[in-house]
Image (cartoon, coloured by chain):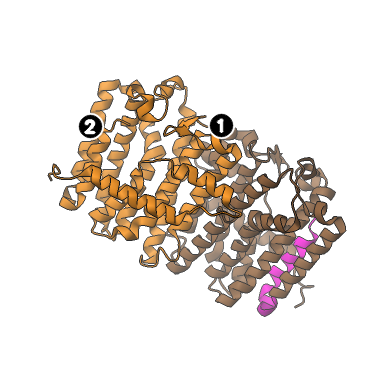
Chain colours: A brown, B orange
Amino acid sequence: MENSQFDLKGYLNKNRDLVEAALERYLPFKEGIYKDILEAMRYSLFAGGKRLRPILCLAATEAVGGSKEIALPVACALEMIHTYSLIHDDLPAMDNDDLRRGKPTNHKVFGEAMAILAGDGLLTEAFALLSHPDLTQNIPAERVVQVINLIAQAAGYKGMVGGQVMDLNYTGKEIDLKSLETMHRHKTGALIVASVKSGAIVGGGKAEEIDALGEYAVQIGLAFQIVDDILDVEGDVAEMGKRPGSDAEQNKATYPRLLGLSQAKERAKECIKKAIKALEPFERKALPLKAIAEYIGKRRK
Amino acid sequence: MENSQFDLKGYLNKNRDLVEAALERYLPFKEGIYKDILEAMRYSLFAGGKRLRPILCLAATEAVGGSKEIALPVACALEMIHTYSLIHDDLPAMDNDDLRRGKPTNHKVFGEAMAILAGDGLLTEAFALLSHPDLTQNIPAERVVQVINLIAQAAGYKGMVGGQVMDLNYTGKEIDLKSLETMHRHKTGALIVASVKSGAIVGGGKAEEIDALGEYAVQIGLAFQIVDDILDVEGDVAEMGKRPGSDAEQNKATYPRLLGLSQAKERAKECIKKAIKALEPFERKALPLKAIAEYIGKRRK
Protein backbone atom coordinates (compact mmCIF):
# COMPACT_ATOMS: atom_id res chain seq x y z
CA MET A 1 0.00 0.00 0.00
CA GLU A 2 1.88 3.06 -1.28
CA ASN A 3 0.81 6.57 -0.46
CA SER A 4 3.71 8.59 -1.73
CA GLN A 5 1.27 10.01 -4.29
CA PHE A 6 -1.39 10.80 -1.71
CA ASP A 7 -1.91 14.52 -1.08
CA LEU A 8 -2.87 14.47 2.60
CA LYS A 9 -2.78 18.22 2.99
CA GLY A 10 -5.22 18.64 0.12
CA TYR A 11 -7.42 15.87 1.51
CA LEU A 12 -7.50 17.39 5.01
CA ASN A 13 -8.22 20.87 3.65
CA LYS A 14 -11.01 19.67 1.38
CA ASN A 15 -12.69 17.66 4.10
CA ARG A 16 -12.19 20.31 6.74
CA ASP A 17 -13.96 22.77 4.45
CA LEU A 18 -16.76 20.25 3.97
CA VAL A 19 -17.12 19.89 7.74
CA GLU A 20 -16.93 23.67 8.40
CA ALA A 21 -19.66 24.32 5.84
CA ALA A 22 -21.85 21.55 7.24
CA LEU A 23 -21.41 22.76 10.84
CA GLU A 24 -22.41 26.23 9.66
CA ARG A 25 -25.56 24.77 8.05
CA TYR A 26 -26.42 22.64 11.09
CA LEU A 27 -25.80 25.32 13.72
CA PRO A 28 -26.20 28.72 12.02
CA PHE A 29 -26.16 31.90 14.04
CA LYS A 30 -29.58 33.50 14.43
CA GLU A 31 -30.69 36.67 16.12
CA GLY A 32 -33.56 36.16 18.56
CA ILE A 33 -34.12 34.31 21.80
CA TYR A 34 -31.31 31.76 21.25
CA LYS A 35 -28.75 34.41 20.31
CA ASP A 36 -26.66 34.22 23.50
CA ILE A 37 -26.40 30.47 23.75
CA LEU A 38 -25.73 30.11 20.02
CA GLU A 39 -22.94 32.64 20.29
CA ALA A 40 -21.28 30.72 23.12
CA MET A 41 -21.72 27.33 21.43
CA ARG A 42 -20.44 28.62 18.09
CA TYR A 43 -17.48 30.46 19.65
CA SER A 44 -15.86 27.15 20.59
CA LEU A 45 -17.25 25.13 17.68
CA PHE A 46 -15.60 27.49 15.19
CA ALA A 47 -12.41 28.14 17.15
CA GLY A 48 -10.13 26.61 14.55
CA GLY A 49 -10.12 22.93 15.45
CA LYS A 50 -8.39 20.46 13.16
CA ARG A 51 -11.68 18.55 12.68
CA LEU A 52 -9.77 15.32 13.13
CA ARG A 53 -12.73 13.30 14.41
CA PRO A 54 -15.16 14.29 11.65
CA ILE A 55 -12.48 13.74 9.00
CA LEU A 56 -11.75 10.28 10.44
CA CYS A 57 -15.46 9.55 10.27
CA LEU A 58 -15.69 10.62 6.62
CA ALA A 59 -12.51 8.72 5.71
CA ALA A 60 -13.90 5.56 7.31
CA THR A 61 -17.10 5.94 5.29
CA GLU A 62 -14.98 6.17 2.14
CA ALA A 63 -12.92 3.14 3.20
CA VAL A 64 -16.05 0.95 3.21
CA GLY A 65 -17.26 2.47 -0.07
CA GLY A 66 -20.00 4.69 1.39
CA SER A 67 -21.01 8.23 0.47
CA LYS A 68 -19.47 11.06 2.47
CA GLU A 69 -22.62 13.17 2.15
CA ILE A 70 -24.57 10.68 4.23
CA ALA A 71 -21.90 10.65 6.94
CA LEU A 72 -21.64 14.43 7.31
CA PRO A 73 -24.23 14.85 10.11
CA VAL A 74 -22.52 12.06 12.06
CA ALA A 75 -19.13 13.68 11.47
CA CYS A 76 -20.42 17.04 12.70
CA ALA A 77 -22.11 15.52 15.74
CA LEU A 78 -18.76 14.03 16.74
CA GLU A 79 -17.13 17.46 16.50
CA MET A 80 -19.88 18.96 18.67
CA ILE A 81 -19.24 16.32 21.32
CA HIS A 82 -15.50 16.87 21.12
CA THR A 83 -16.00 20.63 21.47
CA TYR A 84 -18.34 20.25 24.45
CA SER A 85 -15.72 18.12 26.19
CA LEU A 86 -13.06 20.79 25.65
CA ILE A 87 -15.31 23.53 27.04
CA HIS A 88 -16.11 21.54 30.19
CA ASP A 89 -12.52 20.30 30.63
CA ASP A 90 -11.24 23.89 30.52
CA LEU A 91 -13.59 25.08 33.31
CA PRO A 92 -12.06 26.46 36.52
CA ALA A 93 -13.37 23.47 38.47
CA MET A 94 -11.60 21.12 36.04
CA ASP A 95 -8.30 21.95 34.29
CA ASN A 96 -8.76 25.71 34.72
CA ASP A 97 -7.29 26.66 31.37
CA ASP A 98 -7.38 30.24 30.07
CA LEU A 99 -6.28 29.43 26.53
CA ARG A 100 -7.39 26.86 23.99
CA ARG A 101 -6.05 26.82 20.45
CA GLY A 102 -4.47 30.20 21.19
CA LYS A 103 -7.81 31.83 22.07
CA PRO A 104 -9.41 32.57 25.43
CA THR A 105 -11.41 29.57 26.64
CA ASN A 106 -15.20 29.65 26.57
CA HIS A 107 -15.68 30.55 30.25
CA LYS A 108 -13.10 33.34 29.94
CA VAL A 109 -15.27 34.97 27.28
CA PHE A 110 -18.82 34.08 28.33
CA GLY A 111 -18.47 33.30 32.03
CA GLU A 112 -18.66 29.96 33.79
CA ALA A 113 -22.42 29.52 33.77
CA MET A 114 -22.69 30.10 30.05
CA ALA A 115 -19.71 27.84 29.34
CA ILE A 116 -21.33 24.99 31.24
CA LEU A 117 -24.54 25.55 29.26
CA ALA A 118 -22.72 25.91 25.93
CA GLY A 119 -21.15 22.50 26.58
CA ASP A 120 -24.49 21.02 27.57
CA GLY A 121 -26.05 22.54 24.47
CA LEU A 122 -23.42 21.12 22.12
CA LEU A 123 -23.61 17.65 23.63
CA THR A 124 -27.39 17.62 23.32
CA GLU A 125 -27.37 19.13 19.82
CA ALA A 126 -25.09 16.31 18.70
CA PHE A 127 -27.88 13.83 19.42
CA ALA A 128 -30.47 16.08 17.78
CA LEU A 129 -28.28 16.10 14.68
CA LEU A 130 -27.71 12.34 14.73
CA SER A 131 -31.48 11.77 14.80
CA HIS A 132 -32.54 14.65 12.52
CA PRO A 133 -35.48 13.54 10.32
CA ASP A 134 -34.24 15.19 7.08
CA LEU A 135 -30.60 14.31 7.52
CA THR A 136 -31.15 10.66 8.35
CA GLN A 137 -33.78 9.89 5.75
CA ASN A 138 -31.36 8.03 3.46
CA ILE A 139 -29.91 5.89 6.24
CA PRO A 140 -31.74 2.77 7.46
CA ALA A 141 -33.18 3.69 10.89
CA GLU A 142 -31.59 0.62 12.52
CA ARG A 143 -28.19 1.94 11.50
CA VAL A 144 -29.00 5.39 12.90
CA VAL A 145 -29.92 3.86 16.26
CA GLN A 146 -26.72 1.78 16.22
CA VAL A 147 -24.57 4.85 15.58
CA ILE A 148 -26.31 6.85 18.30
CA ASN A 149 -25.71 4.06 20.79
CA LEU A 150 -22.07 3.71 19.80
CA ILE A 151 -21.42 7.43 20.17
CA ALA A 152 -23.39 7.78 23.42
CA GLN A 153 -21.44 4.90 24.97
CA ALA A 154 -18.14 6.38 23.81
CA ALA A 155 -18.96 9.83 25.16
CA GLY A 156 -20.51 8.70 28.44
CA TYR A 157 -19.29 7.45 31.78
CA LYS A 158 -17.86 4.27 30.26
CA GLY A 159 -15.96 6.43 27.78
CA MET A 160 -14.94 10.07 27.65
CA VAL A 161 -16.66 11.23 30.86
CA GLY A 162 -15.20 8.26 32.74
CA GLY A 163 -11.75 9.09 31.38
CA GLN A 164 -12.00 12.65 32.60
CA VAL A 165 -12.90 11.36 36.07
CA MET A 166 -9.83 9.09 36.04
CA ASP A 167 -7.71 12.03 34.92
CA LEU A 168 -8.96 14.11 37.86
CA ASN A 169 -8.41 11.24 40.28
CA TYR A 170 -4.88 10.56 39.08
CA THR A 171 -3.67 14.15 39.11
CA GLY A 172 -0.82 14.43 41.62
CA LYS A 173 -0.67 10.66 42.16
CA GLU A 174 1.77 8.06 40.97
CA ILE A 175 0.14 5.80 38.41
CA ASP A 176 1.39 2.89 36.35
CA LEU A 177 1.39 2.53 32.59
CA LYS A 178 -1.68 0.30 32.57
CA SER A 179 -3.80 2.85 34.42
CA LEU A 180 -2.51 5.65 32.20
CA GLU A 181 -3.55 3.72 29.11
CA THR A 182 -6.95 2.91 30.58
CA MET A 183 -7.46 6.58 31.25
CA HIS A 184 -6.50 7.64 27.73
CA ARG A 185 -8.51 4.85 26.12
CA HIS A 186 -11.50 6.42 27.86
CA LYS A 187 -10.70 10.11 27.77
CA THR A 188 -9.69 10.49 24.13
CA GLY A 189 -9.53 7.01 22.61
CA ALA A 190 -13.21 6.10 22.91
CA LEU A 191 -14.48 9.02 20.85
CA ILE A 192 -11.81 8.51 18.18
CA VAL A 193 -12.82 4.84 17.91
CA ALA A 194 -16.49 5.88 17.74
CA SER A 195 -15.65 8.42 15.02
CA VAL A 196 -14.09 5.79 12.79
CA LYS A 197 -16.62 3.03 13.53
CA SER A 198 -19.65 5.28 13.13
CA GLY A 199 -18.35 6.37 9.72
CA ALA A 200 -17.98 2.73 8.75
CA ILE A 201 -21.49 1.90 10.03
CA VAL A 202 -23.34 4.70 8.22
CA GLY A 203 -21.30 3.88 5.15
CA GLY A 204 -22.72 0.36 5.20
CA GLY A 205 -19.54 -1.46 6.22
CA LYS A 206 -19.56 -5.19 7.02
CA ALA A 207 -18.99 -6.35 10.60
CA GLU A 208 -15.37 -7.41 9.92
CA GLU A 209 -14.64 -4.08 8.24
CA ILE A 210 -16.04 -2.18 11.21
CA ASP A 211 -13.87 -4.28 13.54
CA ALA A 212 -10.69 -3.74 11.51
CA LEU A 213 -11.30 0.01 11.40
CA GLY A 214 -11.99 -0.10 15.14
CA GLU A 215 -8.54 -1.62 15.71
CA TYR A 216 -7.00 1.08 13.50
CA ALA A 217 -8.74 3.70 15.61
CA VAL A 218 -7.62 2.22 18.94
CA GLN A 219 -4.02 2.44 17.79
CA ILE A 220 -4.15 5.98 16.37
CA GLY A 221 -6.07 7.11 19.47
CA LEU A 222 -3.28 5.86 21.69
CA ALA A 223 -0.61 7.33 19.43
CA PHE A 224 -2.45 10.65 19.39
CA GLN A 225 -2.31 10.87 23.17
CA ILE A 226 1.31 9.83 23.46
CA VAL A 227 2.26 12.48 20.90
CA ASP A 228 0.15 15.01 22.80
CA ASP A 229 2.12 14.27 25.97
CA ILE A 230 5.39 14.54 24.07
CA LEU A 231 4.36 17.87 22.58
CA ASP A 232 3.53 19.15 26.05
CA VAL A 233 7.18 18.60 26.92
CA GLU A 234 8.70 19.71 23.62
CA GLY A 235 6.22 22.12 22.04
CA ASP A 236 6.12 25.89 22.28
CA VAL A 237 3.17 28.17 22.88
CA ALA A 238 2.94 29.44 19.28
CA GLU A 239 2.59 25.92 17.89
CA MET A 240 0.45 24.44 20.64
CA GLY A 241 -1.96 27.27 21.35
CA LYS A 242 -1.42 26.53 25.04
CA ARG A 243 1.51 26.73 27.41
CA PRO A 244 3.83 23.71 27.17
CA GLY A 245 4.86 22.13 30.42
CA SER A 246 1.43 22.68 31.97
CA ASP A 247 0.94 18.92 32.47
CA ALA A 248 4.20 18.68 34.40
CA GLU A 249 3.24 21.73 36.46
CA GLN A 250 -0.02 20.10 37.40
CA ASN A 251 1.94 16.94 38.19
CA LYS A 252 -0.09 14.94 35.68
CA ALA A 253 0.86 11.44 34.65
CA THR A 254 2.17 11.43 31.08
CA TYR A 255 3.92 8.94 28.81
CA PRO A 256 7.21 10.83 28.83
CA ARG A 257 7.15 10.86 32.65
CA LEU A 258 6.47 7.12 32.86
CA LEU A 259 8.49 5.84 29.91
CA GLY A 260 11.05 8.53 29.26
CA LEU A 261 10.91 10.66 26.13
CA SER A 262 12.60 8.31 23.67
CA GLN A 263 10.66 5.25 24.80
CA ALA A 264 7.41 7.24 24.51
CA LYS A 265 8.32 8.16 20.94
CA GLU A 266 9.06 4.51 20.19
CA ARG A 267 5.70 3.52 21.63
CA ALA A 268 3.86 6.00 19.41
CA LYS A 269 5.63 4.63 16.34
CA GLU A 270 4.56 1.07 17.20
CA CYS A 271 0.92 2.16 17.47
CA ILE A 272 1.05 3.82 14.07
CA LYS A 273 2.51 0.64 12.59
CA LYS A 274 -0.30 -1.49 14.04
CA ALA A 275 -2.89 1.01 12.83
CA ILE A 276 -1.58 0.84 9.29
CA LYS A 277 -1.51 -2.94 9.40
CA ALA A 278 -5.23 -3.00 10.26
CA LEU A 279 -5.94 -1.10 7.04
CA GLU A 280 -4.44 -3.70 4.70
CA PRO A 281 -7.75 -5.31 3.64
CA PHE A 282 -9.07 -1.94 2.44
CA GLU A 283 -6.22 -1.39 -0.02
CA ARG A 284 -6.36 1.95 -1.85
CA LYS A 285 -9.71 2.94 -0.32
CA ALA A 286 -7.89 3.41 2.99
CA LEU A 287 -5.13 5.68 1.67
CA PRO A 288 -6.55 8.70 3.49
CA LEU A 289 -6.77 6.79 6.78
CA LYS A 290 -3.21 5.54 6.31
CA ALA A 291 -1.93 9.05 5.65
CA ILE A 292 -3.80 10.35 8.70
CA ALA A 293 -2.12 7.71 10.88
CA GLU A 294 1.28 8.77 9.62
CA TYR A 295 0.38 12.41 10.17
CA ILE A 296 -0.62 11.72 13.79
CA GLY A 297 2.77 10.10 14.36
CA LYS A 298 4.58 13.14 13.02
CA ARG A 299 2.42 16.08 14.08
CA ARG A 300 4.08 19.05 15.77
CA LYS A 301 0.98 20.70 17.24
CA MET B 1 -64.90 11.95 32.52
CA GLU B 2 -65.15 11.13 36.24
CA ASN B 3 -62.16 10.21 38.32
CA SER B 4 -63.57 10.21 41.80
CA GLN B 5 -62.84 6.48 41.82
CA PHE B 6 -59.29 6.89 40.57
CA ASP B 7 -56.61 6.09 43.16
CA LEU B 8 -53.90 8.54 42.10
CA LYS B 9 -51.73 7.89 45.13
CA GLY B 10 -51.71 4.18 44.37
CA TYR B 11 -51.02 4.85 40.70
CA LEU B 12 -48.10 7.19 41.44
CA ASN B 13 -46.61 4.79 43.97
CA LYS B 14 -46.87 1.80 41.66
CA ASN B 15 -45.32 3.61 38.73
CA ARG B 16 -42.66 5.28 40.82
CA ASP B 17 -41.62 1.83 42.03
CA LEU B 18 -41.55 0.62 38.43
CA VAL B 19 -39.30 3.55 37.46
CA GLU B 20 -37.02 3.15 40.51
CA ALA B 21 -36.51 -0.53 39.75
CA ALA B 22 -35.84 0.17 36.08
CA LEU B 23 -33.35 2.96 36.87
CA GLU B 24 -31.58 0.55 39.21
CA ARG B 25 -31.38 -2.03 36.39
CA TYR B 26 -30.22 0.51 33.81
CA LEU B 27 -27.62 2.24 35.99
CA PRO B 28 -26.55 -0.25 38.69
CA PHE B 29 -23.68 0.52 41.02
CA LYS B 30 -20.53 -1.43 40.24
CA GLU B 31 -17.16 -1.53 41.92
CA GLY B 32 -14.26 -0.97 39.52
CA ILE B 33 -13.00 1.82 37.32
CA TYR B 34 -16.39 3.58 36.99
CA LYS B 35 -17.09 3.48 40.72
CA ASP B 36 -16.59 7.20 41.41
CA ILE B 37 -18.61 8.55 38.54
CA LEU B 38 -21.39 6.01 39.10
CA GLU B 39 -21.57 7.03 42.73
CA ALA B 40 -21.95 10.71 41.82
CA MET B 41 -24.49 10.04 39.06
CA ARG B 42 -26.54 7.71 41.25
CA TYR B 43 -26.46 10.04 44.26
CA SER B 44 -28.64 12.55 42.46
CA LEU B 45 -30.59 10.04 40.38
CA PHE B 46 -31.77 8.28 43.54
CA ALA B 47 -32.22 11.38 45.69
CA GLY B 48 -35.95 10.93 46.12
CA GLY B 49 -37.41 12.62 43.07
CA LYS B 50 -41.13 12.39 42.40
CA ARG B 51 -40.42 10.79 39.00
CA LEU B 52 -43.05 13.04 37.47
CA ARG B 53 -41.59 13.02 33.95
CA PRO B 54 -41.20 9.25 33.65
CA ILE B 55 -44.67 8.71 35.12
CA LEU B 56 -46.13 11.18 32.60
CA CYS B 57 -44.37 9.25 29.85
CA LEU B 58 -45.80 5.93 31.03
CA ALA B 59 -49.27 7.41 31.48
CA ALA B 60 -49.19 8.81 27.93
CA THR B 61 -48.22 5.38 26.61
CA GLU B 62 -51.23 3.94 28.41
CA ALA B 63 -53.48 6.70 27.07
CA VAL B 64 -52.75 5.62 23.48
CA GLY B 65 -53.13 1.94 24.40
CA GLY B 66 -49.42 1.05 24.39
CA SER B 67 -47.45 -1.19 26.73
CA LYS B 68 -45.70 0.45 29.67
CA GLU B 69 -42.84 -2.05 29.55
CA ILE B 70 -41.76 -0.75 26.15
CA ALA B 71 -41.81 2.85 27.36
CA LEU B 72 -39.73 2.25 30.49
CA PRO B 73 -36.29 3.00 28.98
CA VAL B 74 -37.67 6.23 27.51
CA ALA B 75 -39.22 7.14 30.86
CA CYS B 76 -35.91 6.53 32.66
CA ALA B 77 -33.90 8.46 30.06
CA LEU B 78 -36.15 11.46 30.72
CA GLU B 79 -35.46 11.21 34.45
CA MET B 80 -31.71 11.08 33.77
CA ILE B 81 -31.96 14.25 31.71
CA HIS B 82 -34.05 15.95 34.38
CA THR B 83 -31.53 14.93 37.04
CA TYR B 84 -28.55 16.17 35.00
CA SER B 85 -30.27 19.53 34.62
CA LEU B 86 -30.78 19.81 38.38
CA ILE B 87 -27.12 18.98 39.09
CA HIS B 88 -25.86 21.61 36.66
CA ASP B 89 -28.45 24.22 37.71
CA ASP B 90 -27.35 23.86 41.34
CA LEU B 91 -23.66 24.51 40.57
CA PRO B 92 -21.97 27.52 42.19
CA ALA B 93 -21.63 29.19 38.77
CA MET B 94 -25.39 28.82 38.24
CA ASP B 95 -27.98 28.95 41.05
CA ASN B 96 -25.42 28.05 43.73
CA ASP B 97 -27.78 25.88 45.76
CA ASP B 98 -26.57 23.84 48.72
CA LEU B 99 -29.74 21.82 49.16
CA ARG B 100 -31.94 19.88 46.76
CA ARG B 101 -34.86 17.78 47.96
CA GLY B 102 -33.57 18.32 51.49
CA LYS B 103 -30.17 16.79 50.75
CA PRO B 104 -26.80 18.40 49.98
CA THR B 105 -26.49 19.11 46.26
CA ASN B 106 -24.19 17.01 44.12
CA HIS B 107 -21.26 19.46 44.10
CA LYS B 108 -21.51 19.84 47.90
CA VAL B 109 -20.88 16.10 48.24
CA PHE B 110 -18.59 15.28 45.32
CA GLY B 111 -17.04 18.64 44.43
CA GLU B 112 -17.69 20.86 41.44
CA ALA B 113 -15.64 18.96 38.87
CA MET B 114 -17.35 15.67 39.65
CA ALA B 115 -20.79 17.31 39.68
CA ILE B 116 -20.22 18.72 36.19
CA LEU B 117 -19.13 15.29 35.01
CA ALA B 118 -22.00 13.50 36.78
CA GLY B 119 -24.40 15.77 34.90
CA ASP B 120 -22.59 15.18 31.62
CA GLY B 121 -22.64 11.45 32.32
CA LEU B 122 -26.38 11.35 33.01
CA LEU B 123 -27.23 13.40 29.93
CA THR B 124 -25.14 11.14 27.72
CA GLU B 125 -26.38 7.95 29.37
CA ALA B 126 -29.95 9.02 28.58
CA PHE B 127 -29.17 8.78 24.88
CA ALA B 128 -27.33 5.48 25.34
CA LEU B 129 -30.46 4.15 27.04
CA LEU B 130 -32.81 5.51 24.36
CA SER B 131 -30.79 3.70 21.68
CA HIS B 132 -29.94 0.53 23.63
CA PRO B 133 -30.05 -2.49 21.30
CA ASP B 134 -31.79 -4.86 23.74
CA LEU B 135 -34.23 -2.32 25.12
CA THR B 136 -35.37 -0.96 21.76
CA GLN B 137 -35.71 -4.26 19.93
CA ASN B 138 -39.52 -4.27 20.15
CA ILE B 139 -39.91 -0.70 18.93
CA PRO B 140 -39.74 0.15 15.21
CA ALA B 141 -36.36 1.85 14.69
CA GLU B 142 -38.02 4.85 12.96
CA ARG B 143 -39.98 5.49 16.15
CA VAL B 144 -36.82 5.24 18.27
CA VAL B 145 -35.11 7.85 16.11
CA GLN B 146 -38.18 10.09 16.30
CA VAL B 147 -38.23 9.90 20.10
CA ILE B 148 -34.49 10.60 20.36
CA ASN B 149 -34.89 13.68 18.16
CA LEU B 150 -37.88 14.92 20.14
CA ILE B 151 -36.06 14.56 23.46
CA ALA B 152 -32.77 16.01 22.19
CA GLN B 153 -34.59 19.08 20.83
CA ALA B 154 -36.48 19.53 24.09
CA ALA B 155 -33.34 19.22 26.21
CA GLY B 156 -31.08 21.32 24.00
CA TYR B 157 -30.53 24.99 23.29
CA LYS B 158 -34.00 25.39 21.77
CA GLY B 159 -35.45 23.86 24.93
CA MET B 160 -34.20 23.32 28.45
CA VAL B 161 -30.66 24.64 27.99
CA GLY B 162 -32.02 27.74 26.23
CA GLY B 163 -34.48 28.27 29.08
CA GLN B 164 -31.70 28.15 31.64
CA VAL B 165 -29.81 30.79 29.66
CA MET B 166 -32.90 33.01 29.65
CA ASP B 167 -33.28 32.47 33.38
CA LEU B 168 -29.68 33.60 33.97
CA ASN B 169 -30.13 36.60 31.68
CA TYR B 170 -33.37 37.70 33.34
CA THR B 171 -32.16 37.43 36.93
CA GLY B 172 -32.25 40.87 38.49
CA LYS B 173 -34.05 42.40 35.51
CA GLU B 174 -37.64 43.46 35.00
CA ILE B 175 -39.35 41.15 32.55
CA ASP B 176 -42.87 40.94 31.20
CA LEU B 177 -45.27 38.04 31.36
CA LYS B 178 -44.62 36.97 27.78
CA SER B 179 -40.88 36.63 28.36
CA LEU B 180 -41.47 34.80 31.63
CA GLU B 181 -43.68 32.28 29.86
CA THR B 182 -41.19 31.86 27.03
CA MET B 183 -38.52 31.13 29.61
CA HIS B 184 -40.60 28.55 31.44
CA ARG B 185 -41.82 26.94 28.23
CA HIS B 186 -38.14 26.29 27.52
CA LYS B 187 -36.69 25.67 30.97
CA THR B 188 -39.23 23.20 32.30
CA GLY B 189 -42.08 23.01 29.78
CA ALA B 190 -40.16 21.52 26.86
CA LEU B 191 -39.03 18.41 28.73
CA ILE B 192 -42.50 17.84 30.18
CA VAL B 193 -44.00 18.05 26.69
CA ALA B 194 -41.31 15.68 25.41
CA SER B 195 -42.06 13.27 28.26
CA VAL B 196 -45.72 13.03 27.33
CA LYS B 197 -45.24 13.01 23.56
CA SER B 198 -42.42 10.45 23.63
CA GLY B 199 -44.63 8.13 25.68
CA ALA B 200 -47.37 8.54 23.09
CA ILE B 201 -44.94 7.90 20.22
CA VAL B 202 -43.36 4.70 21.59
CA GLY B 203 -46.85 3.56 22.53
CA GLY B 204 -47.84 3.82 18.86
CA GLY B 205 -50.16 6.83 19.15
CA LYS B 206 -51.66 8.45 16.05
CA ALA B 207 -50.52 11.95 15.02
CA GLU B 208 -53.68 13.61 16.37
CA GLU B 209 -53.33 11.75 19.67
CA ILE B 210 -49.72 12.87 20.00
CA ASP B 211 -50.80 16.46 19.30
CA ALA B 212 -53.62 16.39 21.85
CA LEU B 213 -51.32 14.97 24.50
CA GLY B 214 -48.77 17.62 23.56
CA GLU B 215 -51.34 20.34 24.30
CA TYR B 216 -52.14 18.65 27.63
CA ALA B 217 -48.44 18.71 28.45
CA VAL B 218 -47.95 22.37 27.51
CA GLN B 219 -50.70 23.31 29.94
CA ILE B 220 -49.56 21.16 32.87
CA GLY B 221 -45.98 22.32 32.28
CA LEU B 222 -47.03 25.92 32.64
CA ALA B 223 -49.20 25.13 35.66
CA PHE B 224 -46.34 23.24 37.25
CA GLN B 225 -44.08 26.27 37.06
CA ILE B 226 -46.68 28.72 38.30
CA VAL B 227 -47.35 26.46 41.29
CA ASP B 228 -43.60 26.18 41.87
CA ASP B 229 -43.32 29.96 42.04
CA ILE B 230 -46.31 30.13 44.39
CA LEU B 231 -44.77 27.49 46.65
CA ASP B 232 -41.53 29.47 46.78
CA VAL B 233 -43.54 32.28 48.36
CA GLU B 234 -45.81 30.16 50.53
CA GLY B 235 -43.91 26.93 51.22
CA ASP B 236 -41.71 26.01 54.15
CA VAL B 237 -38.34 24.32 54.17
CA ALA B 238 -39.60 20.98 55.48
CA GLU B 239 -42.10 20.62 52.65
CA MET B 240 -39.99 22.07 49.86
CA GLY B 241 -36.58 20.62 50.64
CA LYS B 242 -35.15 24.05 49.88
CA ARG B 243 -35.45 27.46 51.46
CA PRO B 244 -38.61 29.30 50.47
CA GLY B 245 -38.19 32.89 49.40
CA SER B 246 -34.91 32.13 47.64
CA ASP B 247 -36.33 33.29 44.28
CA ALA B 248 -37.30 36.66 45.76
CA GLU B 249 -33.87 36.96 47.38
CA GLN B 250 -32.21 36.41 44.02
CA ASN B 251 -34.62 38.94 42.55
CA LYS B 252 -35.94 36.39 40.07
CA ALA B 253 -38.98 37.01 37.92
CA THR B 254 -41.88 34.86 39.15
CA TYR B 255 -45.61 34.63 38.45
CA PRO B 256 -46.60 35.92 41.90
CA ARG B 257 -44.29 38.93 41.42
CA LEU B 258 -45.75 39.73 38.00
CA LEU B 259 -49.40 38.81 38.51
CA GLY B 260 -49.88 38.93 42.24
CA LEU B 261 -50.50 35.79 44.25
CA SER B 262 -54.22 35.35 43.67
CA GLN B 263 -54.01 36.03 39.92
CA ALA B 264 -51.16 33.54 39.67
CA LYS B 265 -53.32 30.92 41.37
CA GLU B 266 -56.15 31.69 38.95
CA ARG B 267 -53.79 31.31 36.02
CA ALA B 268 -52.63 27.88 37.22
CA LYS B 269 -56.25 26.75 37.51
CA GLU B 270 -57.01 27.80 33.94
CA CYS B 271 -54.06 25.80 32.65
CA ILE B 272 -55.22 22.69 34.47
CA LYS B 273 -58.68 23.15 32.97
CA LYS B 274 -57.27 23.37 29.44
CA ALA B 275 -55.07 20.34 30.06
CA ILE B 276 -58.04 18.26 31.14
CA LYS B 277 -60.04 19.40 28.13
CA ALA B 278 -57.30 18.13 25.79
CA LEU B 279 -57.73 14.65 27.31
CA GLU B 280 -61.41 14.28 26.37
CA PRO B 281 -60.88 12.10 23.26
CA PHE B 282 -58.99 9.52 25.34
CA GLU B 283 -61.87 8.94 27.75
CA ARG B 284 -61.08 6.50 30.56
CA LYS B 285 -57.60 5.64 29.23
CA ALA B 286 -56.50 9.15 30.26
CA LEU B 287 -57.76 8.96 33.85
CA PRO B 288 -54.21 8.85 35.23
CA LEU B 289 -53.17 11.88 33.16
CA LYS B 290 -56.27 13.73 34.31
CA ALA B 291 -55.57 12.94 37.94
CA ILE B 292 -51.95 14.03 37.52
CA ALA B 293 -53.09 17.39 36.12
CA GLU B 294 -55.35 17.91 39.12
CA TYR B 295 -52.54 16.90 41.45
CA ILE B 296 -50.17 19.43 39.87
CA GLY B 297 -52.74 22.14 40.48
CA LYS B 298 -53.02 21.20 44.15
CA ARG B 299 -49.50 20.12 45.09
CA ARG B 300 -47.97 21.57 48.25
CA LYS B 301 -44.32 20.66 47.59
Q: Residues within 10 Å of mark 1 (few under 14, many from 20)?
A: some
In the image, which disc is placed on residue B269?
A: 2
Picture residue at 54% right of the left edge, 69% below the top? A201
Say which chain tag 1 marks: B
In the image, which disc is placed on residue A87?
A: none
Q: Is residue B143 left or right of residue B264?
A: right
A43 drawn magenta: no
Q: Secondary structure at mark 2?
A: helix
A283 drawn magenta: yes
Q: Is residue A248 left or right of residue B83?
A: right
Say which chain tag 2 marks: B
The image shows residue A126 at horizontal and vertical percentages of 52, 53
In the image, which disc is placed on residue B93?
A: 1
Q: Nearer the viewer, residue A256 or A70?
A: A256
Rendered image quadrant of residue B191: top left
Q: Amino acid at mark 1?
A: Ala
Q: Tell me the distance, in whole angstroms, between the alpha carbons under discs 1 and 2.
A: 35 Å
Label 1 in the same subunit as label 2? yes
The image shows residue A231 at horizontal and vertical percentages of 80, 51
Q: Nearer the viewer, residue A78 or B124?
A: B124
Find the residue positioned furthest to the right: A262
Residues drawn in magenta: A279-301
Rendered image quadrant of residue A22: bottom right
Instruction: Considering the whole magenta stretch, tell me its main secondary structure.
Output: helix
The image shows residue B254 at horizontal and vertical percentages of 37, 25
